Image (spheres, grey):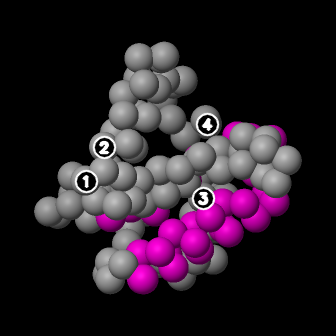
């Protein structure tokens, strides 16, 4: 993942997964695995509460490099926006490295500014 400082360790991955599971239990949303119709792992996407300004909700997506450029992130992010709207969640954010042009493009395609 080019816009992360390094690959996560196994323990950090476990913590990441537990955080997503805890979010689902506490808030009814969190990160979910993205697969194609054949069951191939593409990445993850979902809503996650961030410790920013009282707990803003982020649309978060990470795709394997082989899965980038096919519209999967946009499709998943749009589904997150729909879910948030149906749950009465107002403002959504995305925390994006300014140098990550593809991720910025997904945010713009899904109506974020």
Q: Provide the secondary structure element on which disc 4 rests.
A: loop
The Cα atoms of the two marked residues, 4 and 3, are separated by 11 Å
Q: Quadrant of residue 93?
A: bottom left
Instruction: Count residues near mark 2 (Cα–Cα under 10 Å), then give few for <14, some for 14-19, many for 20+.
Output: some
Say what secondary structure mark 2 lies in. Answer: helix
- In the depicted view, which residue is nearer to us: 50 or 20? 20
- Give the Cα separation between the discs numbered 2 and 1: 6 Å
Asked whether residue 54 is in view, the answer is yes
Going from the N terminus, do you reach mark 4 or mark 2 first?
A: 4
Residue highlighted by disc 4:
2
Q: In this image, 97 relative to 102: left or right? A: left
User: Which mark is on residue 22?
Assistant: 2
The residue that mark 3 highlights is: 103
Q: Secondary structure at mark 3?
A: helix
The residue segment tinted magenta is: 57-86
Viewed as shown, does residue 47 lie left or right of 66? left
């Amino acid at each position: 993942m080019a816009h992360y400082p390094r690959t996560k360790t196994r323990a950090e991955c476990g913590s990441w997964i537990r955080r997503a599971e805890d979010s689902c239990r506490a808030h009814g949303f969190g990160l979910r695995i993205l697969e194609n119709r054949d069951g191939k792992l593409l990445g993850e996407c979902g809503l996650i509460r961030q410790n920013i300004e009282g707990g803003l909700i982020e649309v978060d997506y990470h795709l394997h490099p082989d899965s980038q450029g096919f519209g999967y992130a946009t499709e998943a992010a749009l589904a997150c926006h729909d879910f948030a709207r149906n749950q009465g969640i107002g403002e959504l954010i995305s925390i994006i490295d300014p140098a990550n042009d593809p991720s910025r493009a997904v945010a713009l395609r899904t109506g974020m500014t």
